[in-house]
Image (cartoon, rainbow, N blue to C red):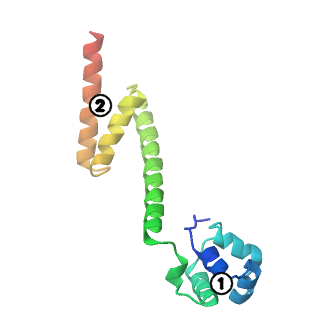
Amino acid sequence: MEDALPNRIRELRTAQQLSQEALANRVGTLSKMQVSNIERGITQLTHFWMRRFATALQCYPSDLLPDEDVRIREIEERLLAEIIKELFQWKSDRRKELTERGIIISPHELGMLAAHTYTGATRDTESARMIQADIDKILSFRMKAAS
């Protein structure tokens, strides 16, 4: 199931003093539980249902969506979560690669490499060169510290 964005259906329904059951009857082919799930964002509000709810609530489909700032913040939070997930996966993959090459790297050092990757264009040749340069610096520093 795709994550549902917040909506204003409950707000508009209660402003018209409609129960979930009454709104379900106006929309047609929906149960009270389905209306509840859509209101709470458990079920995705599709374009089809958006038009049906807008007609039932006598408003524009865009009125069913939250204010622009809320929508933008929600989208930004999702994008950030995706980037963080991707970053953790990247770090896990690099740690495995480096370990296979016999290079043991600390979480701090791996974080430094990951930061370089995400400050510029990701996964391109320049990033690869920057990462290799960082690995060389880390190894060089370790050799100097060991001597």
- The number of discs equals 2
Could you say whether the residue bearing mark 1 is in a helix, strand or loop? loop
Name the image quarter holding residue 18: bottom right
Q: Which residue is mark 1?
A: 16
As displayed, is residue 72 above or below residue 23? above
Left/right of residue 138 with respect to residue 110 in the rendered view: left
Q: Amino acid at mark 2?
A: Ile
Mark 2–mark 1 distance (CA, rounded to whole Å): 63 Å
Frontmost residue, 12 versus 119: 12
Q: Residue at x 65, y 66 (%)?
A: 42
Could you say whether the residue bearing mark 2 is in a helix, strand or loop? helix
Question: Residue 82: where, in percent of width, then height?
Answer: 46, 54
Proximity of marks 2 and 1: CB atoms separated by less than 8 Å: no
Name the image quarter holding residue 19: bottom right
Q: Which residue is mark 2?
A: 135
Q: Amino acid at mark 1?
A: Gln
Question: Residue 119: where, in percent of width, then height?
Answer: 29, 47
Left/right of residue 62 with respect to residue 104 in the rendered view: right
Q: Residue at x 24, y 40 (%)?
A: 130
Name the image quarter holding residue 12: bottom right
Q: Which numbered disc flags the more N-terminal residue, 2 or 1? A: 1
As displayed, is residue 98 above or below residue 11? above
- Label 1 neighbourhood size at 10 Å, few (<14), some (14-19), many (20+)? few
| Quadrant the C terminus occupies | top left
Question: Residue 46: where, in percent of width, then height?
Answer: 58, 78
Closer mark to the observer between disc 2 and disc 1: 1
Say the numbered circle drawn on residue 2: none
Question: Residue 43: where, in percent of width, then height?
Answer: 65, 70
As displayed, is residue 139 above or below residue 96? above
